[in-house]
Amino acid sequence: MAVEAIAALQIFTSLFDNAKGLVEIRDAATRDGAVLMIQKQVLEAQAAQLALVKRVGELEQEIVGLKDWEAEKQRYELKAIDRGAFAYMPKAGVEDEEPPHWLCANCFNKRQKSFLQFKGQDRSATGGRGTTATYGCDGCRATVTVYYTRNPLTPWAHDSAEQA
């Protein structure tokens, strides 16, 4: 953005120098050529100014988006929802009117809020765990497998007897 501002300043400086020189020109044809050159420089300067104004608007929108995400991010915390399974959950006391939910950790770290959706159960789970439930992210296609009774309403307690 600094490069564009310097370029615009150089255009205005050149424009001013040419306008000063116009006063000294007596020949009509030379003067008309100089006027056309000045008009061209004015248009270039206006285009450069318009580009800078547009860029400033884009940056202001980006700042607002970052501030909004930062406020939203403060409402969540990363939690272990089962062995080796993590999701972002609303912090206690900031749930608002939203039902309990899990957010995909991958998407959350990319500043995207993507809910983990129940995708089904597997009764033939290996490892002696019994039935498992799969939750998936429709944003990045990641999946999380948890013990079948775990869901956003029943967070995993690390000291639970089920852990063993």
Image (cartoon, rainbow, N blue to C red):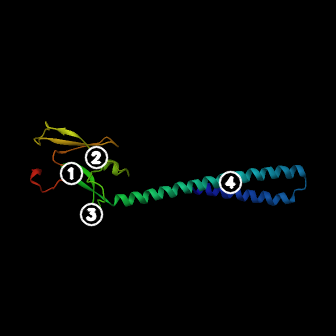
Residue 28 at x, y percent in the picture: 90, 51
Distance between the alpha carbons at the discs numbered 3 and 4: 52 Å
Answer few, some or many: residues within 10 Å of disc 4's Cα (few below 14, many 20 plus, some between 14 and 19): some
Distance between the alpha carbons at the discs numbered 3 and 1: 19 Å
Three-letter amino acid code at the position of disc 2:
Leu
Sequence-earlier tag: 3 or 2: 3
Q: Which residue carries the number 1 mark?
A: 81
Q: Can residue 3 be seen in the rendering of this structure?
A: no
Residue 135 at x, y percent in the picture: 24, 43
Does residue 155 appear left or right of residue 70 in this picture?
A: left
Nearer to us of marks 3 and 2 is 3
Nearer to us of marks 3 and 1 is 3
Three-letter amino acid code at the position of disc 4:
Gln
Sequence-earlier tag: 1 or 2: 1
Answer few, some or many: residues within 10 Å of disc 3's Cα (few below 14, many 20 plus, some between 14 and 19): few
Q: Can residue 75 be seen in the rendering of this structure?
A: yes
Secondary structure state at the residue bearing disc 4: helix
Secondary structure state at the residue bearing disc 1: strand
The disc label shown at residue 93, or none? 3
Distance between the alpha carbons at the discs numbered 4 and 2: 49 Å
The disc label shown at residue 116, or none? 2
Sequence-earlier tag: 4 or 2: 4
Does residue 81 appear left or right of residue 14 in this picture?
A: left
Query: Which image quadrant for residue 96?
Result: bottom left
Secondary structure state at the residue bearing disc 2: strand
Q: Which residue carries the number 4 mark?
A: 46
Three-letter amino acid code at the position of disc 1:
Ile
Task: State the quadrant of the N terminus.
Answer: bottom right
Q: Are marks 4 and 1 in contact (CB under 8 Å)?
A: no
Three-letter amino acid code at the position of disc 3:
Gly
Residue at 46%, 59% in the rendered image: 64
Residue located farthest toward the front when viewing the structure as drawn: 97
